[in-house]
Amino acid sequence: MDIVPLLDRIGEAPTAALFGLITGVVFGVAAQRSRFCLRAAVVEFARGGLGDKVAVWLLTFSTALVWVQGARLLGLFEVGDARMLAVPGSWSGAVIGGLLFGAGMVLARGCSGRLLVLAATGNLRSVVSGLIFAVVAQMALTGWLAPLRDRLAALWITPGGRNLDLLPALHLPDGAGLVLGLATALLALVLSRRNRIGARRLVFASGVGFAVALGWYLTYALSLSAFEPVAVESLTFTGPSANTLMFFLDRHAALEFDIGLVPGVVLGSFLSALLAGELRFQGFEGPTPMRNAMIGAALMGFGGMLAGGCAIGNGVTGASVFAGTAWVALCAMWAGGIVTDMALRGRGQVATA
């Protein structure tokens, strides 16, 4: 893709923000229509089910694997240039942060990406939780919580100055990632048929995974054409939420992919809900759900920053390039979410899956 004319016309930073906006809009529309959410899938699984929510998550996950690994095999995307692989990863951060994030998303009744989508449709619970999430993430990035995050992350770092690329580390053939994606997609389709999920919802669930691949491809293309170094990245919401918050608080903040991503998700989700007639205000049902949501949002903000990404940033985006810490964080998020849901049910606090 020749983006030089676009760079000449609007510049590198606005182009990066535009690519983030495009990626965000695609994700926002697809996530709103498919009701994609890791928290919902975890809770459904924890309660002994393999229903529509697990099927949607698996289809999103597999679609991202197929698109990204397919692009890699075709030479359209160089996985090694991805920022998540090009910098050291933290095993301790992935485990501890993943557990905290998993617990937080169950308490808050939605992962960070889902909260952003719901906030755009009028869910005031998600607005409050999303703001707390962004503030705590910023505190963990550069504020009072940053020293604690640094100490925990430094407990166990990947060797060699880079994250671990699982495919070569496990001595797997080049096509192993694509094969895994196709096998997971087949499982997702079997579950979808069993749960009678309509074709439209399946298409939108696949669209979430496609948005991940789109972000990788656009930032990679920009990195090849831009004069200044450009981070090759894709969908994640911990860092971008914090960066977007600071962009509106600091008039000296620069445009980048992250700054376009979050508004793009809001715009896409809002337009999708508007066209579907699903815009409606919703609030907290009582003090306990409000308390849980606020605590959960804070846990997600710190845990996501410690783990190097959220449920989407690690669980789909990072996993699609087979970053070692992303897969560990994803497993920890599932574990943290399952244990937290069991604990809530034990106390009689049962939320909808």
Image (tube, rainbow, N blue to C red):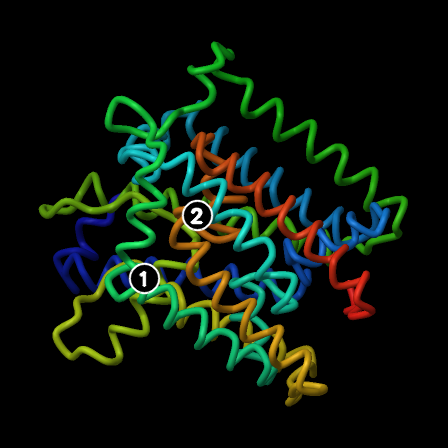
Question: Relative to residue 42, is residue 301 drawn left or right?
Answer: left
Image: 235 above or below 187: below
* Residue 298 coordinates in the image, percent (x, y): 47, 68
Image: 110 above or below 334: below
Secondary structure found at label 1: loop
The residue singled out by tag 1 in the image is: 145
Question: Between disc 1 and disc 2, whose residue precedes?
Answer: 1
* Residue 249 coordinates in the image, percent (x, y): 24, 80
Most foreground residue, 44 or 120: 44
Mark sitting on residue 214 = 2
For residue 1, say whether it is visible: no
Write the residue at 38% across / 26% down.
Answer: 164
Most foreground residue, 35 or 91: 91
Residue occupying the far left of the picture: 227
The kind of residue on which mark 2 rests is Leu
The kind of residue on which mark 1 rests is Leu
Question: Relative to residue 141, is residue 73 drawn left or right?
Answer: right
Question: Relative to residue 305, is residue 266 drawn left or right?
Answer: right
Q: Are marks 1 and 2 in contact (CB under 8 Å)?
A: no
Which picture quadrant has residue 260?
bottom left
For residue 347, say whether it is visible: yes
